[in-house]
Amino acid sequence: MAASLATTALSLACIVLTYLYGSGFLACIMVRFNEAFSISLRIDGASMVYGAIVSVLWPLVTAYSLDYMSHEGHENRFFAFWLMAYGVVLGIAYSEDFLTLYFFYEVLTLTTLPLVMHAMDEKARYAGRKYLVYSLSGAAFAFIGIVFLLNYGVGHLNFTYGGILDQSLAAGNERTLELVFVAAFFGFGVKAAVFPFHGWLPDASVAPTPVSALLHAVAVVKAGAFAVLRLIYYGFGADFLRGSWAQTVVMTAAIVTIVYGSARALRTPHLKRRLAFSTVSNLSYILFALTLMTPAGMVGGMTHMVYHAFTKITMFCCAGAIILKSGKEYIYEMEDFGRAMPVVFATFTVSSFALIGMPPLGGFAGKWMIAEAAVASVNPLAYAGIAALILSTLLTTLYMLTIVVRAYFPVGELDRAALARVHDPARTMWIPLVLLTASGVILALLSNEVIGFLWNAVPRNW
């Protein structure tokens, strides 16, 4: 356990030094098969964004997990797969090409499966089987897209701004390539929980809460969104796809998922499952921005990726503390918990307002950038996306404030004896909560600097 914390902290320090002293020369060929195929790593603008999210949040949740997992048991097995998953997600972030991305993408499923199934009871085994079937099936469709990129590309799979399709080979095959893109989008979109391939995510909430936090904020769903970003902007190319029926299909899927996820969250009384459906909706904010297929859309998607990560990981860690210290999992059971668990619910409340998008918190910056990019795209369907964002914000307000209001303004009779046994967790758990919340607030107050950094991640020669 201590080794897991030390390793994640050391990797964070190394990555910080890398960012400070430049990354243009940093490339690593792990395995070379031939001139076209290799497993290799390289840092570029997009990978710096995703890699920074992973590197900052993973050590904090590792510290939170040390106390939490002592109550779950089998800590050595848990932290072994935990540490492997951390390395794999960094591999996804720093992949140089689509083959490397696909390799780590598949390994991510195998390393996170034991974490989802940690309890090994009937629910955990069912969730694990569902997660495995969805993930492997989606990856198969994504692989089809990679094969076509190789056959209709410029002879390599290295990420290239603007795409790697050879226009002379693509000429006359546009419809086929657009169909393949749609298949690959939904293939990678399985991990990003796009409708109708989202079903694995709410069921995976049976996993220990630290796993849920990373599944929803850093590891799996963000890996799916990051892969979609690579597919659109570095694979098929936004210029090739913009204005096509394929763009209409994938953007419509994202818009439908935004509304669907929020509506399901409002109707779900279980705390972790409500947060899971909230993730379904918010990940499609990112996908909607990416399917605008403009530089502003890319920046808007990355902005929401950053702020949603800090917000949602805090909320899941709060949910874990609530379940661990009270044994309650349903929202209607949490009357007056705001007074019983002041630190947990203070951080949860701040995160709730951030998720809603209340300025100046981070959710506002993400939604604003996405809406601004949608207007600038001059795509009629994008206006439907803006309407979906507004509706989703209203629904988010309802399903998040319902929890907060119950915690601070109870109605009906309270079981005072039961409430007396509810309290904040140990410092090893609530200090990471405070640090996560404070980090999210600071990033929100520095939104101009964050967005400027993200704009620098977009290629100058777009």
Image: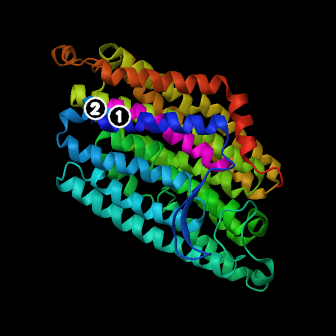
Q: On the rendered structure, is 118 left or right of 192?
A: left
Q: On the rendered structure, is 115 left or right of 104?
A: left
Residue found at x 35% / y 21%: 430
Q: Is residue 160 magenta?
A: no
Image height check: is 306 above or below 427?
below
Image height check: is 17 above or below 442?
below
Closer to the camera, 397 or 173? 173
Dot 2 falls on a residue whose secondary structure is helix
Image height check: is 24 above or below 341?
below
Q: Nearer the viewer, mark 1 or mark 2?
A: 1
User: What residue is shown with label 1?
Assistant: 5
Image disc number at residue 66: 2
- Quadrant assignment for the N terminus: top left
Q: Label 2 is placed on what type of residue?
A: Leu
Circle 2 residues within 10 Å: few <14, some 14–19, many ≥20: some
Q: In the picture, residue 9 is in which quadrant?
A: top left
Q: Residue 314 in the image: x percent, y percent? A: 44, 31
Q: Which residues are magenta?
A: 42-64
